Image: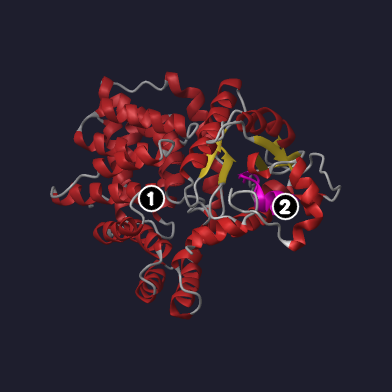
Amino acid sequence: MSDHNQESSFCLGINEDAKFVLPFLSITIGAFKMFDVKKSCFVIMPFGKRVVGESSILARFIGLRGPEVDFDHIYKNIFEPAISAVTLPEGGKLIPKRADQTFLTGVISHDMFIDIEYSRFVVADLTGLNANVFYELGMRHRARSTGTALFRQVGQPIPFDVQQTRAFPYAYNPQEEAQKSRELITRVVTESLVHSPLDSPIWQVLQQQRAGGLAEESLRLAEEALRARDLPNAERRLIAAAAADPSNVLTHMKLGLLYRDLGEWENARDSFDQVLRMLPNYPEALREKGIAENKIHGKTKVGPDGEASLRAALAKAPHDFDAAASLGGILKRRGDYAGAAGQYELATDLSRGHPYPLLNMIACRARRDGRLDLAPFQTSIEHAEAVLRPQVESGYDSPWSFFDLAEICLLTNREAEGIALIRQAQMQPGTVGWQLKTFRETLQLIAEVSDLDSLNNAIAVLPQED
């Protein structure tokens, strides 16, 4: 019996062939009869009004806080209607449920544990990094290999431990953005029910990694090195883990991402190829392979330029804004600024205004039109700056958050601040030459069609060598 079938047999209510009830669940048999977990979607999220977002020590000292979010309102107006609109593959509608709703046994924690493990689907909102949310998500990921989707509000960070699991961004205002978010949630849940992708990082490890031994110890030491940004040591540890357990998909994926960060594109491509040999339809591996192929092609002019891999990734995961933005990068390097602007615009819409595709869209539109026009994007730029400032303060997504905020400053006549941010980005641990080159090329693209001296002055402080 395969691992998948063993899990299906164990998880009551998911497998149509499961005809037994485990003894320790006998006290809840009435509840199962009255509430069909095969049609339920349990929502893991904070309750009530909560302050979200990170602030500096000084800001907290003087009483400044992040924004207050009404999660009850979000559940009622975003998640509940979006989930209720999902049609199950066998027919009928998915039923949303949250832990503060009325339970049949009257014991909230007892029923909550049942719902987390046995619900047909689980949606988790990571906004605010709530401890209870991550505790419950960990339970779900250990119990089920599939049937879980993560969401977070636009601009909210996620911890390192779950960064390899995609958390879809959503917005709850204004109304048009709220409607887009409902449609996104409905689509993600519907597609996941149809395709049942492996979405638990715990199961990814358990199904591919041998218990104990050199592989496990090497992975642990690699994680420590990654957290400390000791990339050479992390590389050595991940190579040792891959040699000890060549079938571990997650190890090869992490190794490829590390090579990407180091700018070692041939090694990165080879690692992603290894992942795809084991999981041919893994969208993230397809996307990262396409990015690596494009970097190699840009240097050697030999081999694929990554377009085919990125289009395959988008076909598997149409909501992947990173893949859409990376495809925009390929078209930009070809000089197809109209096509690039279209892809960056798609990525901006999918990400609900992520600064990276937004700023690249502005650059490509400027090059396409022969002039820089920021007027249509003033509100979007202000929103992007509000998102980037706490990221820069905390060092999140370095050095890209520094580059993006610097670019906004340069475009809005704040040259001194922009150049200061560029210098800070160059001093961040892990910043490498290809990242500086990518940012320099973007500034040069805009400088060619604008009269902003700030752009040329900023370009002058960037390394001119690749």
Residue under numbered circle 1: 282
Rendered view: 406 above or below 299: above
Q: Secondary structure at mark 2?
A: helix
Q: Which of the 4 quarters of the picture holds residue 276? A: bottom left
Residue under numbered circle 2: 114
Q: Badge 1, how many Cα within 10 Å: few under 14, some, many 20+? A: some
Residue 309 percent across, percent down from the top left: 28, 44
- Amino acid residing under circle 1: Tyr
User: Can residue 427 be seen in this snapshot?
Assistant: yes
Give 310 or 299, whichever is nearer the viewer. 310
Q: Secondary structure at mark 1?
A: loop
Rendered view: 375 above or below 181: above
- Which range is magenta? 112-132
Q: Earlier in the sequence, mark 1 or mark 2?
A: 2
Residue 227 percent across, percent down from the top left: 50, 64
Residue drawn where x is 33% and y is 41% of the image? 326
Give 409 or 436, whichever is nearer the viewer. 436
